[in-house]
Image (cartoon, rainbow, N blue to C red):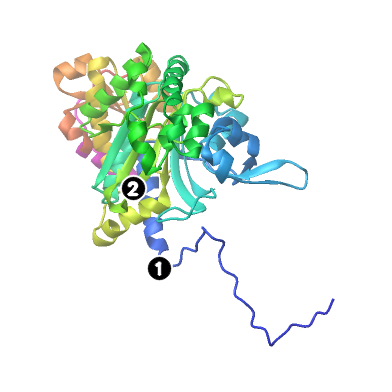
Amino acid sequence: MSSKVDVTKPIQPIRAVKGTRDLLPSETPVWQRVEEEARRVLAAYNFREIRTPVLEPTELFARSVGIDTDIVTKEMYTFQDRGEESLTLRPEATASVVRAYIEHSLYNSDRIQKLYYLGPMFRRERPQKGRFRQFYQIGAEVLGSESPAVDVEVLEMLVAYLGRLGIQDFRLLLNSVGCGECRPEYVKVLRRALEDVKAQMCVDCQRRADTNPLRVFDCKVEADQPIIAKLPVILDHLCLECRQHFNSVTQGLEQRELRYEITPRLVRGLDYYTRTTFEITSGALGAQNSVLGGGRYDGLSELLGGPPTPGFGFAIGEDRLVLAAQQALLSQDVGGQVAPPDGQVDVYVAWMGHEALRPAAELARSLRRQGRRVELPYDFTKLKKAMGIANKLNARFAVIIGEAELARGRYQIKDMSTGQQEEVEPDRIPAYLRDRLAAAAEGKTVATGQSFRSE
């Protein structure tokens, strides 16, 4: 073969693969700001970063996402490597995080794991505004608790994050897709309802009606929407436990004054979801307006061969988030402090008794807005155990809120390094801790008042 180059034929430049793009230096500052704010807010809620491989065994997604989903049947980049193993570029990261959680036995180190990730995902979708075949996600997972307080706190965190980006025009859409007890019965009802109408629907919906009826609600074909609008909804078929769980989530959102809309046909596009599902849309994006979504997946760990582990998480489409946030970030300065280094909690809020949960959550939210890293337990814990958890988390301070503290109108604040405790009115606590933490950073001693009830 001749090594000569035909100089008469111009060399054609190589372009990026269709559906991918370069982020140029003029664009990346906004991306960096979006990611910095994400890290700041996630750290304030005591999430830690995890990084998983871009390549995973194909079986991981077939088993978790669902063999009949569009992602698995149409969109994944899958190939045989030289060892004849089927590998896939990850189309989403929750399955990868849970796989790592099981593989490295993270359940043995802490009962609850709060993990986040940032990175590229890959799906062979039709390129459109804000959607690419290599796209980027920011996501987080809470593994180890089925408490509805987890759902509420994560949703609160997401609203806080969007606020830090200056995004105001958004809607939080909420639904429950039931559990392994009540959903199969609902699917039977849905399948019967589809028998009479599926012939009038698109080819994909005809297939879904037989293989996975819930996926019919993912249909974007305009002509199918009037039919879908008349189908029975799962909210009318929830079991008692799922109904109570969903009610607790909505009540928690209302207590924190977070606006939401119940959307009975919201099911998300992945098979592993149970109970709470949600989506946040932005008016800045036009028709394709979804920015992020997620929900609960209490059976995913067992599906992947791990121990029973309830989970709740979300994924943000960073490409679309940047579009929604770009103008706001360029036009205003969003201030705030950087959270402390990973592995150290500023404040552990220990609450005792149901009446203490709401004021504890309000205090935690106030401190997190200052950029403090705060841990608020989801379930009631006795004081001695709570202090043990605070020590394990290397917390600088613990705030104790029980019946006695609520009655006196003053909470106990314990300096975990000295053991000294002091009573402080709730409204003064953010300023009090700000001064104490600033003084500690400078190596100074702050005069305190009388101490109470040392442990």
Can residue 444 be seen at all in this image of the molecule?
Answer: no
Numbered badge on residue 228: none
Q: What stretch is highlighted in magenta?
A: 431-450
- Horizontal side of 180 relative to 445 (left or right) equals right
Q: Which residue lies furthest to the right in this view?
A: 1
Q: Which amino acid does label 2 sit on?
A: Asn
On the image, numbered disc 2 is attached to which residue? 289
Near-viewer residue (240 or 340): 240
Q: Residue at x 37, y 59 (%)?
A: 30
Whichever of callouts 1 and 2 sits on the residue coming sooner in the sequence is: 1
Q: In front of the other: label 1 or label 2?
A: 2
* Element marked by disc 1: loop
Please identify the quadrant where the N terminus is shown.
bottom right
Near-viewer residue (65 or 185): 185
Q: Residue at x 37, y 41 (%)?
A: 223
Tell me if mark 2 has few (under 14), some (14-19) or many (20+) residues whose alpha carbon lies within 10 angstroms of its own.
some
Q: Which amino acid does label 1 sit on?
A: Ser
Magenta stretch contains residue 435? yes
Q: Which residue lies furthest to the top in this view?
A: 240
Near-viewer residue (183 or 275): 183
Quarter-of-image position of residue 80: top right
Q: Distance between the residues labelled 1 and 2?
A: 25 Å
On the image, numbered disc 1 is attached to which residue? 26
In the displayed structure, 318 sits above or below 216; it is below
Identify the main secondary structure in magenta: helix
Q: Estimate the x, y position of residue 227 in percent, counting from the top left.
A: 36, 32
* Element marked by disc 2: loop
Please identify the quadrant where the C terminus is shown.
top left
Quarter-of-image position of residue 18: bottom right
